[in-house]
Amino acid sequence: EVQLVESGGGLVQPGGSLRLSCAASGFRFNDYWMHWVRQAPGKGLVWVSQIKSDGSTTSSADFVKGRFTISRDNAKNTLYLQMNSLTVEDTGVYYCARALMARPLAPFDPWGQGTLVIVS
Amino acid sequence: DIVMTQSPDSLAVSLGERATINCKSSQSVFYSSTNKNYLAWYQQKPGQAPKLLIYSASTRQFGVPDRFSGSGSGTEFTLSISSLQAEDVAVYYCQQYSTAPFTFGPGTKVDIK
């Protein structure tokens, strides 16, 4: 079964840091681009960042550039999101998601269950 | 950035009736090289992660009931639920994955009338 399990969320003060993890199983992790998407409480979905299958290429939304860093460890089948200089606007559920196909421009499926980040 | 808009914001439909959601992109998400529209639809139920329903504007993901269908091309798209079931109550999002940042629409909430 293809599965993504996020962890690392929690309560952090403004200006603080957190590192989110996403453990992947059930597929060849190093074949797929991976993404982070977030959702503020009661709000819609916002794409955060993506990383190429081999980790050589990344891109991020403007609102996280210079603060968040996406990375991956293909030996550990794990995706990461290092979040620094957090603000209250970063509060929300963070989902990791896999590209549906093993290519760069693809819809997102599956998704993890999400991990809640509260900046307060 | 490509801006995605959806209409209506919410709708209530009787069980067994048709629900239709519209999505527009600020620029075309069609790739002539692949002859595909890079447009997806997701369903999100309360407390759950989003679930992919439709991709390439009209291809149903495996396991998605055939009452869900997608249509459109270029900048205008539609998600239809042909016969609304109780389990279809959710928020539906469109997303373009043609160009980063991969933007989502604001969502349409579907309820039972």
Image: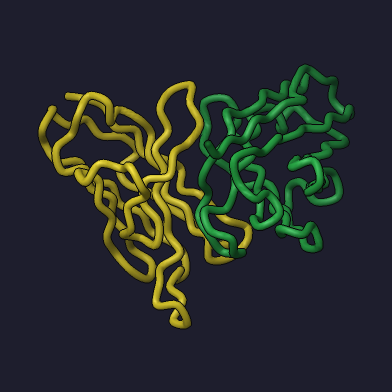
Chain colours: A green, B yellow
Horizontal side, residue B57 vs residue A85: left or right: left
Count numbered badges in the picture: 0
Task: Say if residue B88 shows up in the picture.
Answer: yes
The picture places residue A120, in percent across and down from the top left corner, at 78, 18
- In the rendered image, the residue lying farthest to the bottom is B33
- In which image quadrant can residue B109 be found? top left
The picture places residue A100, in percent across and down from the top left corner, at 52, 53
Residue at 62 percent across and 61 percent down: it is B100
Horizontal side, residue A73 vs residue B15: left or right: right
Task: Say if residue A61 shows up in the picture.
Answer: no
The picture places residue B107, in percent across and down from the top left corner, at 42, 40
**Residue B22 against residue B30 in the figure, above or below:** above
The picture places residue A6, in percent across and down from the top left corner, at 68, 30
Residue at 40 percent across and 71 percent down: it is B36
- In which image quadrant can residue A112 be found? top right
**Residue A62 against residue B44 in the figure, above or below:** below
Quarter that holds the C terminus of chain B:
top left
Quarter that holds the N terminus of chain B:
bottom right
**Residue B60 against residue A80 in the figure, above or below:** below
Residue at 46 percent across and 48 percent down: it is B105
Residue at 39 percent across and 38 percent down: it is B43
The residue lying toward the viewer, choosing from A21 and B107, is A21
